[in-house]
Amino acid sequence: MNELEQGSVRISNDVVATIAGLAAVDTSGVAGMSGGISEGITKKLSGKQVQKGVSVEVGEQEAAIDLKVIVHYGSKIHEVCRELQENVKEAIENMTGLQVVEVNVKVEGVAFKEEEPLALEPAKIK
């Protein structure tokens, strides 16, 4: 055989999760990611860097992504989720060469605009 064995390339779950998370928060209408209580406990117990609101399964050629997000109040949730799926799929496929077979989105909350804090008058010194 005349071909040179190149070896293998594996992309870690953390790398794929980071790409997915960054693409997700760059999507219009997404207020942020939702990690939930169990993810916080996992992070504390394992000491591993866990991507908030993102879980991935990465094979040799394919990846499946699960996202937990919070959307802005007033956004059309179905449109935000469709755009989110497309953005995450495109980012992962372009950067890693993996085929993204599914991007599952769970909307876990709605973010409201923060109200401006009330201005307090300074206390008068007597």
Image: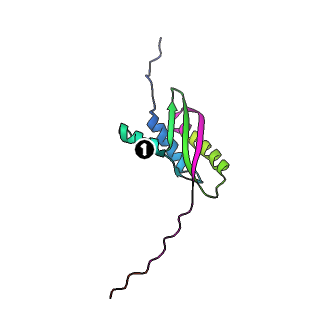
Q: Tell me if 81 is positioned left or right of 57 in this view.
A: right
**x, y percent for residue 46:** 37, 37
**x, y percent for residue 75:** 64, 55
Asked if residue 112 is positioned above or below residue 88 in the image, the reply reads: below
Q: How many labels does the image show?
A: 1
Q: Mark 1 points at which residue?
A: 40
Task: Residue at the far bottom: name it.
Answer: 126
Q: Tell me if 59 is positioned left or right of 104 in this view.
A: left
In this orientation, which residue lies closer to the viewer: 62 or 34? 34
- Mark 1 lies on a secondary structure that is helix
In this orientation, which residue lies closer to the viewer: 80 or 113? 113
Residue found at x 48% / y 45%: 36
**x, y percent for residue 5:** 44, 18
The C terminus is located in which quarter?
bottom left
Q: Is residue 51 visible?
A: no
Task: Residue at the far front: name it.
Answer: 126
Asked if residue 75 is positioned above or below residue 100 in the image, the reply reads: below
Q: Tell me if 68 is positioned left or right of 83 in this view.
A: left
84 in the magenta segment = no
Q: Can residue 8 be seen in this view?
A: yes
The colour mode here is: rainbow
Residue found at x 47% / y 16%: 3
Q: Tell me if 81 is positioned left or right of 52 in this view.
A: right
Range of magenta residues = 92-120
Task: Residue at the far left: name it.
Answer: 126
**x, y percent for residue 32:** 52, 51
Crowd tier of the residue under label 1, counting other residues whose Cα lies within 10 Å: few below 14, some 14–19, many 20 or above: few
Residue found at x 39% / y 41%: 43
Residue found at x 48% / y 71%: 117
**Residue 94, quarter of the rendered image:** top right
Q: What residue type is labelled 1?
A: Gly
